[in-house]
Image (cartoon, rainbow, N blue to C red):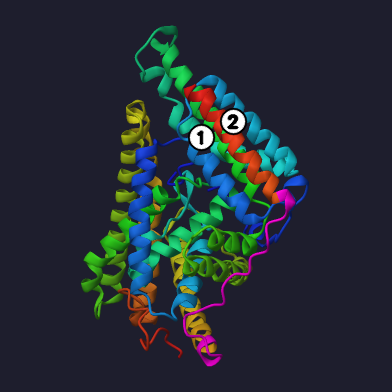
Amino acid sequence: MAHIPDGVLSVPVLAGGGVVTAAALAYALKKLDEDSLPRVAVLAALFFVASLISVAVGPTSVHLLLSGLMGLIIGWAAVPAVFVGLVLQTVFFGFGGVTTLGVNTMDIALPGVLWAMLFAPLLVHATPRRAAWVGAVVAALSVATTAVLVALVLTLSDSSYTLSARIVLLSYGPLLVGEAVITAFACGFLARVSPDMLGARALRRGGKIAASS
Amino acid sequence: MSGKASAAAIFAENRDAGPLAAIDPRVRLAAAITFLALLAVLHTAPALIAALLAALAAAFFARLPFRATLRRLTAVEGFLLFLLLTLPLTMPGHALFSLFGLPVSEEGVRRAIVIIVRVNAGVLMAAALLSTMGTMRLAGAMSGIGVPPRIAHLFQLTVRYVGVFHEEYARLRRAMRARGFRAGSNRHSWRSLGHLLGMLVLRSAERAERVAWAMRARGFSGQFRAFAQRRLERADRLFILIWPVLLIALAWLEFG
């Protein structure tokens, strides 16, 4: 439901989302080392594949956004990663739109990056249990923020979407639960196996990125 | 996201067919963006009908596969159903009839139809112009119309690794299935999937590190070679002449 297609939103909203995403992309790309592009590509691909996993939550099943986990692992690089993933989904599956790339990237990537930045200090030397809790909180907050942003851009586009936007908000419930639970287990696993991975330190040059290297 | 989406769709490089195949990817990307941007401001019936017809014509000229295109359209219809279900009931206006005691307003129905036509025209046009050119040509087209080359290269590299991780993921899933794992809605399933995800992150991080070192060893310093662009040919120039005519006609139907 975070993939808004072409033809739904109004022009000012599309332009606003485009400007925000362009600024975030420029900032993220400037922050990267000149040779870390392959790393971002590898992780962007990983998150694209992971979003194809369907997770059963009660009677429904959801596809994960993983924006919270992305923020925790790659920080600002999540913005270009999400952008590239959305381009792929738009062109090859028809999910989302071309003119809405800016708005959709903003809705999905920014909450994950910002909440992860806020909570990253808690992950330093964290026990697996604490890492799992931080992962769950960041994932839940990211999905909730994404839901609010999607509802907001719909309402701002056209006042007659107001009630629909509220229903869209409710539809994020299962995703929030699934995302929080899976991210919690993934973060607990990473804290146990490779503690250096968490806290957006994965892309630092010379940072030890994996347990076996 | 529908479960039908497979990573395989991404690796079908260059399935171009029909008359549109002769057009340069840059020109097609620019055409798609301009059309979709204009589409966002169309509200009146004649303009929207013309836009839908143009999209259908483009789909025909691109020889889009019928069933795959239908699947794309139904995926969008799900989103629309969600969004528009309430419109006829909530918009104030002249009541057509009442449903469960709620008046269904004519304005609401009209607004819903406008959005349905607009979205479907957009999906068809984007599919016709972009979905068959293949990822590598799309990356070239992006850099050709002014997208920063780093994004275009990131896009290319990402596509390449999507394939790798899709295989990796399929292998891990097969291994889980072989041990009797069936995904359900319970703690054990979620823990297994969470660990699967963590494992994928770990392996991908190791691979990323290896790739970065391998590229550095071959002298990579953050600069790729520029994308090679071919010269525009007669078909392209013809298309560049025709396209603004279509856009102006749509704008005239809307505002004229």
User: In the figure, is residue B149 to the left or right of B55?
Assistant: left
Q: Secondary structure at mark 1?
A: helix
Residue A134 is situated, as x and y percent measured from the top left of the image, at 27, 66
State if disc 2 and disc 1 touch (CB < 8 Å): yes
Q: Which numbered dot is residue B51?
A: 2
Chain letter belonging to callout 2: B
Against A46, residue B16 (above or below) is: above
Crowding at dot 2, Cα within 10 Å, few <14 / some 14-19 / many 20+, comes out as many
User: In the figure, is residue A213 to the left or right of A132?
Assistant: right
Count of picture labels: 2
Chain letter belonging to callout 1: B
Residue A64 is situated, as x and y percent measured from the top left of the image, at 45, 55
Q: Amino acid at mark 1?
A: Leu
Q: Residue at x 72, y 55 (%)?
A: B233
Q: Residue at x 35, y 52 (%)?
A: A19
Crowding at dot 1, Cα within 10 Å, few <14 / some 14-19 / many 20+, comes out as many
Give, as a single range, the part of the protein colored magenta.
B215-235
